[in-house]
Image (cartoon, rainbow, N blue to C red):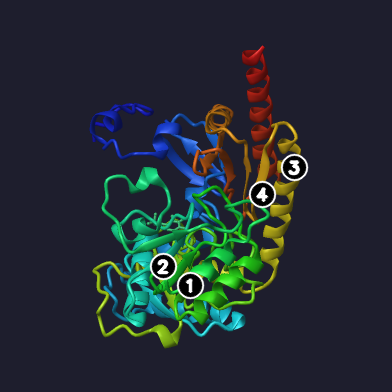
Amino acid sequence: MNLPPPGDKSIFQRRESEARGYCRRFDVVFGSASGALLRDVRGREYIDFLAGCAALNYGHNDPDMSTALIEHIQGSGITMGLDLHTEAKQAFMTQFERHILAPRGLPHRMQFTGPTGTNAVEAALKLARKVTGRHNVVAFTNGYHGVTLGSLAATGSRYHRMGAPLAGVTRLPYDGYLGAGFDTADLLERMLDDPSSGLDAPAAILLETVQGEGGLTAATPAWVERVASLARRHGALLIVDDVQAGCGRTGRFFSFEGMDLQPDLIVLSKSLSGYGLPLAMLLVHPERDQWRPAEHNGTFRGNTHAFVTARVAVEKFWSGPVFQMEVARRAQIVTQHLERMARRVHGSRLKGRGMMQGLDVVSGELAGQICDRCFEQGLILETSGAHDQVLKILAPLTIGLDTLERGLAILDQAIAASMVLGLRQAA
Ligand SMILES: *Cc1c(COP(=O)(O)O)cnc(C)c1O
């Protein structure tokens, strides 16, 4: 092979579509990774507070998952299995039932859609419309559900929606959208109750309990419970999009655990495989499982290699209470540090919960500067929110405490440096 020298990025500039995104901010060539660390081809190490946008909740290249996958491949295990019964799928489903669904009293069935989050959201919307015979869907301000046309209609971000004719979604204000004195569930209730409100009876109400891309706004349990009961009362399905907030990100396997509700449909993807392999699953309440055979078809439904690693993830992290305690400890450390950082930035606020927390620093420009400074110092961190104004910490849930502290120290110093620079520029 005659390849360009390490670190030469010209092929990306020459031939990769303008649609590329994350690589613009983190503009190096990465070569390897383990746990919470990434290395570029020049040998520089970075602490990963992006974690594949929450697709790497258990870090990079978990050794038990690597071993299981290598054994599967070397043993000529199935790679491509359509939706045939395979040993790997059987093992995953068995352990997912045993360690996740059964202990939580969830009777749901598992539907394997195409392997991305947006594929499973599309399946959820389509099923809700089929089951109810209705078309309209209620989604919320600053929600993010993917970029294929059906999911995109439910996504709030104008930047992502640009240029697509989208219909069939009524957008209503998320919890807290109109300030602390206004319960937006009141508006939803009023509009659902009033046949002349202009809101067509919805097939589904679609929500994230913590808005991952929309700025880490966490809904209160009381609000989510009220929306769930309104959905039930009005014959709409409740769809919880747990693509980002699920798989332990908020501290429990599902983001709605501890809330008094049971979603009709639950969407999982990102960290489901545990290894960063593409895998998406729609959990369907049996009463809602009204698909006819192969009605929602697709070639790549279920990813057999991902079933292998997903099974290991469930067994390794979710068969007992220890992992959840470790995640809670890390979340507490993040909160403590963010509280201290918040005092440096006038008007800033803590956002999110569990291991999807961040700091709203009011200005997208400031947040971007801070991220760039972090990257210079060896920390990968992204922004979120309508104005990219929220510094978003998505460290692997398995991150070592010393690495977590090191990453948070880099962030703290980057904030401090940006504030000093800001003051100088103002003077
Ligand atoms: C990332 C994300 C999606 C879309 O998943 P893709 O795999 O990017 O299609 C949907 N919903 C939420 C909440 C997400 O964070």
> Which label sits in the foreground, 4 or 3?
3
Mark 1 / mark 4, whichever is N-terminal: 1
Q: Please identify the quadrant where the N terminus is shown.
A: top left
Residue drawn at x 59%, y 28% is: 377
Q: Position of residue 270 (x, y in %)?
A: 45, 59
- Identify the disc placed on residue 400: 4
Q: Along the line of sight, which residue is nearer the eye, 20 or 215?
A: 215
Q: Which residue was labeled with disc 1?
A: 192
Q: CA distance from mark 1 to mark 2?
A: 7 Å
Q: Which residue was labeled with disc 2?
A: 199
Q: CA distance from mark 4 to mark 3?
A: 21 Å
Residues under numbered marks 1 and 2 in contact, where contact means CB atoms less than 8 Å apart: yes
Mark 1 / mark 2, whichever is N-terminal: 1
Residues under numbered marks 3 and 1 in contact, where contact means CB atoms less than 8 Å apart: no
> Which label sits in the foreground, 1 or 4?
1
Q: Along the line of sight, which residue is nearer the eye, 30 or 367?
A: 367
